[in-house]
Amino acid sequence: MKKLLWASAAVIGVGAIGFFGFAPGIVERGMNRWTGAVWPVSAEASAVHGRLTVIDLHADTLMWQRDLLSETEQGHVDLKRLETGNVALQVFSSVTKTPRGQNYEANGGDTDNITPLVIGQMQPTRTWFSLLERSLWHAQKLQDAEDRAQGLLRIIRTPGDLEKLLADRAAKVPVTGALLSTEGAQNLEGDIANLGTLHEAGFRMIGLVHFFDNDVGGSMHGLKKGGLTALGAQVVRESEARGMIIDLAHSSAATYADVMRIATRPVVVSHGGVKATCNTPRNLTDDQLRLLKANGGMIGIGYWDAAVCEPTPQATARAILHVIKVAGIDHVGLGSDYDGGTTVGFDTAHLDALTQALLAAGLSEADIAKVMGGNAARLLAAGLAPR
């Protein structure tokens, strides 16, 4: 009998190891896809791309059980592919909660897809039921990657850090920057003091909402889609004072307008699109683009279908050109939403395809340089400075 019990326990143990070892990877492979399409890049576009400072304002890579330093064909981002794509700085978000049955129209906040993923990936038990601890774990993962990268990966926390990164890259030093952001402020767990905890952990951008309304503000995908709460207004003020940039991606129209009324620094919409070229609930109106211009902020245009309606470099270029038409060349950049459960037409190693599309659309190299990273570098340098 004892032998039978031990044998049963061994089988269960092996099964659990198999499940926890392989299931998260299977889940990710089904969610983070790219079409594998080949986008021809001319010698001119390749040369232009090699001279650019490329900054992407949003990727969800830290959510997954992958090592940034390991070369893989899984997902969209790792350090090697960032290097191949000539990316100077990648903003990494911390996804802490998403609703079951997630959609772009209306979601409640009473369910969570991330908890099973957290447990399945065998993250520390402190992260199982704490959204704050999930973000702190993501910060720890990025710090660990930096510690092991032998100088090839550098976390950016201050304007001085950013200035040194850009100077080193101009001098051909092989280094890629990383900056921490939140995908929704539900990880504050209703306590403004936790903003300081996140800042100390290295977070320098804070998305207010994600796919559901929270105690900071309304989401464009929420049930009520209300405006900024009293706590949300406090978060905006204290974030600006600390040198944490406000991210309005996923914000309801009311939250967006409320923040624009009180913000004293430029904000970002880290990843999204525009209704004029892709009329989905995910995207901004021209009036919202004009508010963004008045604020001095910028939008990072994404590469996935809900942002640009088809995952091609040309579709992303069309959205970028529309922002330029409405808000001006200084208010648009890149916001891939890589590794965010998206299907894209190219991964980060193939960003030169977007440079090719922008050249083909008639943009000058100077304007392409602004779009691909110059605008983001300027906004980050200003926004990271504490008061």
Image (cartoon, rainbow, N blue to C red):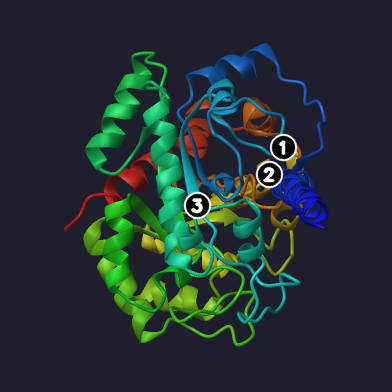
Tell me the quarter of the picture where residue 111 sits. Answer: bottom right
Foreground tag (3 vs 2): 3
Question: Residue 313 got which mark?
Answer: 1
Q: CA distance from mark 3 to mark 1?
A: 23 Å
Q: Is residue 359 above or below residue 195?
A: above
Quadrant of image for the C terminus:
bottom left
* Residue in view at x 60 percent, y 76 percent: 212
In the image, what residue type sits under mark 2? Thr
* Between discs 3 and 2, the one toward the N terminus: 3
In the image, what residue type sits under mark 3? Ser
Foreground tag (3 vs 1): 3
Q: Secondary structure at mark 1?
A: helix
- Mark 3 lies on residue: 93
- Mark 2 lies on residue: 316
Q: Name the foreground residue: 205 vs 61.
A: 61
Q: Is residue 297 above or below residue 45?
A: below
Q: Secondary structure at mark 2?
A: helix
* Residue in view at x 32 percent, y 68 percent: 194
* Between discs 3 and 1, the one toward the N terminus: 3
Seen from this angle, which residue lies furthest left?
387
Tell me the quarter of the picture where residue 232 sits. Answer: bottom left
91 on left or right of 20? left
> How many neighbours does mark 1 have within 10 angstroms: few (below 14), some (14-19), or many (20 or more)?
many
